[in-house]
Image: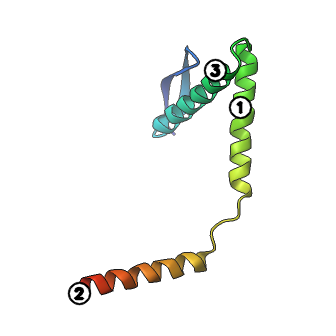
Amino acid sequence: MSVETVEVQIFDKSYRINSPAGEQATLKQAANYLDQKMREIRAASKNMESERVAVLAALNICHELFSSKAKPAEDPSKIAQALQLLIGKIDRAIAS
């Protein structure tokens, strides 16, 4: 597997990170998201140390991840039913 180096900016610092080929865009998105979360925390508490800001941002992101995993998935039968209703409406609109 090929590895490429990506440079990202997080909280006004530059980091060079090795990334699998094809994953650079996702890594940059993750870095931008982390930077955004850190800036939100810093805005709420101007005197907080950068290390604490980073830990709180990481904790918030982990909480988001675990919360999204805990949500029950949509019932496939409800999705299929909604799709059938939409197909019916489209068929009627085309026929008109």
Q: Quadrant of residue 10?
A: top right
**73 or 23: nearer the viewer:** 73
Q: At label 2, which amino acid type do we have?
A: Ser
Looking at the image, is mark 3 or mark 1 earlier in the sequence? 3
Q: Residues within 10 Å of mark 2 (few under 14, many from 20)?
A: few
Which residue is painted at 74% across and 57% down in the image?
70
Q: Which residue is mark 3?
A: 43
The local secondary structure at tag 2 comes to: loop
Residue 22 in the image: state x and y as whole percent. 45, 40
Colouring method of the image:
rainbow
Q: Residue at x 55, y 14 (%)?
A: 12
Secondary structure under the numbered disc 3 in the rendered image: helix
Tag 3 near tag 1, CB within 8 Å: no
* CA separation in Å, label 3 and label 1: 16 Å
Q: Is residue 48 left or right of residue 1?
A: right
User: What's the distance in space between the residues labelled 3 and 2, CA to CA?
Assistant: 56 Å
Q: Earlier in the sequence, mark 1 or mark 2?
A: 1
**Drawn side of residue 85 relative to residue 54, left or right:** left
- Identified by mark 1, the residue type is Ala
For the image, the number of numbered tags is: 3
| Residue 12 vertical placement versus 33 (above, below) | above
Residue at numbered disc 2? 96
Q: Position of residue 21 (x, y in %)?
A: 47, 37
The quarter of the picture where residue 62 lies is top right
Q: CA distance from mark 1 to mark 2?
A: 54 Å
Residue visible at 59% across and 80% down in the picture: 77
The residue tagged 1 is 58
Q: Please, what is the three-letter code of the amino acid marked with disc 3? A: Ala
Q: Position of residue 11 (x, y in %)?
A: 59, 18
- Residue 89 lies, with reference to residue 62, above or below; the image says below
Q: Is 75 located above or below residue 12 in the figure?
A: below
